[in-house]
Image: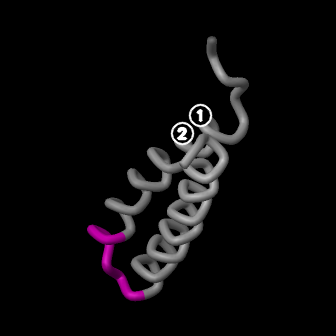
Amino acid sequence: MGRRTTGWGFVLFTIVSILWIYSGLMKDAMPIAAMNAVLFLINGWGVWRYLIRKEQP
């Protein structure tokens, strides 16, 4: 599908991770918040790799 589509998929996953972190913190579900904090970092790396960083030759 291409770098741009993949990058926007990571943006979507990042937004969902933020929402799950918020939900986990509000309901005292720390395992959910912690797991999604890790996923947030992974998805942020995906956004950087596919949308921000220049393509490597």
Q: Is residue 14 above or below residue 24?
A: above
Q: Is residue 48 above or below residue 54?
A: below
Q: Which residue is mark 2?
A: 45
Crowding near pointer 2: few (<14 within 10 Å), some, many (20+)? some
Q: Secondary structure at mark 1?
A: helix
Residue 24 position, x and y percent, is 40, 78
Write the start and end of the magenta stretch as one range: 27-32
Q: Is residue 21 magenta?
A: no
Q: Secondary structure at mark 2?
A: helix
Q: Which mark is residue 49?
A: 1
Q: Is residue 30 magenta?
A: yes
Residue 2 position, x and y percent, is 58, 43
Q: Residue furthest top?
A: 57
Q: Which mark is residue 37?
A: none
Q: Are marks 2 and 1 in contact (CB under 8 Å)?
A: yes
Q: Quadrant of residue 48?
A: top right
Q: Amino acid at mark 1?
A: Arg
Q: Is residue 23 above or below residue 5?
A: below
Q: Nearer the viewer, residue 28 or 23?
A: 23
Q: Amino acid at mark 2?
A: Trp
Residue ID at (61%, 48%) = 7
Residue ID at (45%, 75%) = 20
Crowding near pointer 1: few (<14 within 10 Å), some, many (20+)? some
Residue ID at (53%, 76%) = 19
Q: Is residue 26 above or below residue 9?
A: below
Q: Nearer the viewer, residue 36 or 9?
A: 9
Q: Residue furthest bottom?
A: 27
The answer to whether 37 appears left or right of 28 in the picture is: right
- The mark closer to the camera, 2 or 1, is 1
Distance between mark 2 and mark 1 Cα atoms: 6 Å
